[in-house]
Image (cartoon, rainbow, N blue to C red):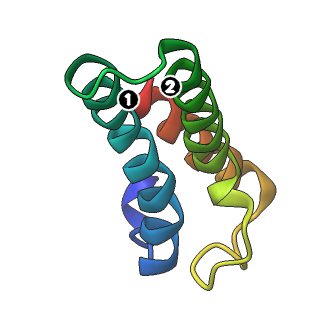
Amino acid sequence: MAADRPAPTTGLKVAVGIPLAILMAGFPIAMVNVFVLGGDRQLWADFLAVTYLLGFYGMFIAPWLPTSGLSDRPWLERLEVTVVIWFWCV
């Protein structure tokens, strides 16, 4: 059944890629600022918490955005894409 579904579109890849890039960049930025530059640990811990919040929730809502490849798919297929993203990232 999965073979007859179209591949993910560029819009979905971008909608998932941007929060994933934010998520992946957050820890190295915070680590360098704390351990190399001597930044405030509490400030950078808060930065990291906000970064993870934006990254994970951005990936969670990505299949529900009105991208061209997902706009014609039913609710259950969008839910399936959401579960696959969470399984892949967490």
**Disc number for residue 44:** 2
Residue type, label 2: Trp
Residue at image coords 34%, 40%: 24
Place residue 54 in its image quadrant: top right
Residue type, label 1: Ala
Q: Is residue 18 above or below residue 47?
A: below
Q: Residues within 10 Å of mark 2 (few under 14, many from 20)?
A: some
Question: Is 33 placed left or right of 59 in the picture?
Answer: left
> Which quarter of the rendering shows the C terminus?
top left
Residue at image coords 79%, 56%: 75
Question: Please, what secondary structure does the residue beneath circle 1 have?
Answer: helix
Residue 10 x %, y %: 42, 79
Residue at image coords 49%, 41%: 85
Residue furthest to the left = 36
Which residue was labeled with disc 1?
30
Place residue 25 in its image quadrant: top left
